[in-house]
Image (tube, rainbow, N blue to C red):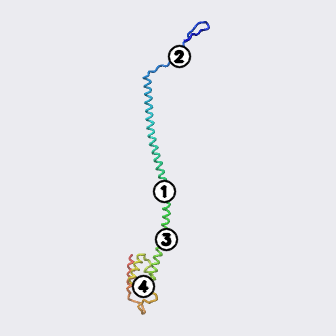
Amino acid sequence: MADNATPDGNQTTTVPSTPPTDKMVPERDLVAVKEGLNKQVAELKTELENSKKTADGHYGDLLNERASKEAATRKLEELSTKLAGLETLQTQLTSEIETRKKLESQLLETKRNQLLAEYNIPKEVVADKGAAELELLEQSLRLIGDRKRSGIDGGGGGTGSRTAKTGRELILSGLDQHFKGR
């Protein structure tokens, strides 16, 4: 403490002023508040961890969906490429089928013409026959063995019409009747 003189000569002692002190809080209350705050912090941390787990799960689902979408897009591109190739092959196949039909028709006509030229048979016999029927007819005609002979008269001589049928004529008429039933 310091002594100070006043102008009138009196000496005064000044007491240093101290700020008023706040109320004193008991330590147990501070500990209780700290424990309450620690409890709230722990609850918030737990809630944050749960939120992270949920977010991680959603993020994983999002990644899986994105990967699935990318895989589906790649598969769609592959299928589009294969579809274009398939359409090209289908066009080629259609063209080849038409060509094959034309060639089969030409082959059948050639076979008919060969039979007409090689054997002395009427055109009506081979007109509507398919490949299998023409093959059967040719085998039958080979068995008969009566081929058209160039430059040689295969007839029996004489004039007039024949009344008796030859073996060849009998077989041809039998084949005609057989094929008419089909």
Between label 2 and label 1, give the one nearer the viewer.
2
> What residue does disc 2 label?
18
The residue under label 4 is 147
Q: Earlier in the sequence, mark 2 or mark 3?
A: 2
Callout 2: SS? loop
Q: Amino acid at mark 4?
A: Arg
Single out the mark in the foreground, 2 or 3. 2
Q: Residue at x 44, y 27 (%)?
A: 34
Mark 2 vs mark 4: which is more N-terminal?
Answer: 2
Quadrant (top left, top right, bottom left, bottom right) of the C terminus = bottom left
In the rendered structure, the answer to whether residue 177 lies left or right of residue 65 reads left
The spot of residue 156 in percent (x, y) is 41, 91
User: Residue 68: percent from the left, percent from the top?
Assistant: 46, 50
Q: Nearer the viewer, residue 4 or 50?
A: 4
> In terms of secondary structure, where does tag 3 sit?
helix
Q: Foreground mark, 1 or 3? A: 1
Mark 1 = which residue? Answer: 78
Q: Secondary structure at mark 1?
A: helix
- Distance between the alpha carbons at the discs numbered 2 and 3: 118 Å
Residue furthest out toward the right? 7
Q: Earlier in the sequence, mark 2 or mark 1?
A: 2
Disc 1 packing (10 Å; few <14; some 14–19; many ≥20): few
Badge count:
4
Cα gap from disc 2 to disc 1, whole angstroms: 88 Å
Q: Amino acid at mark 3?
A: Thr
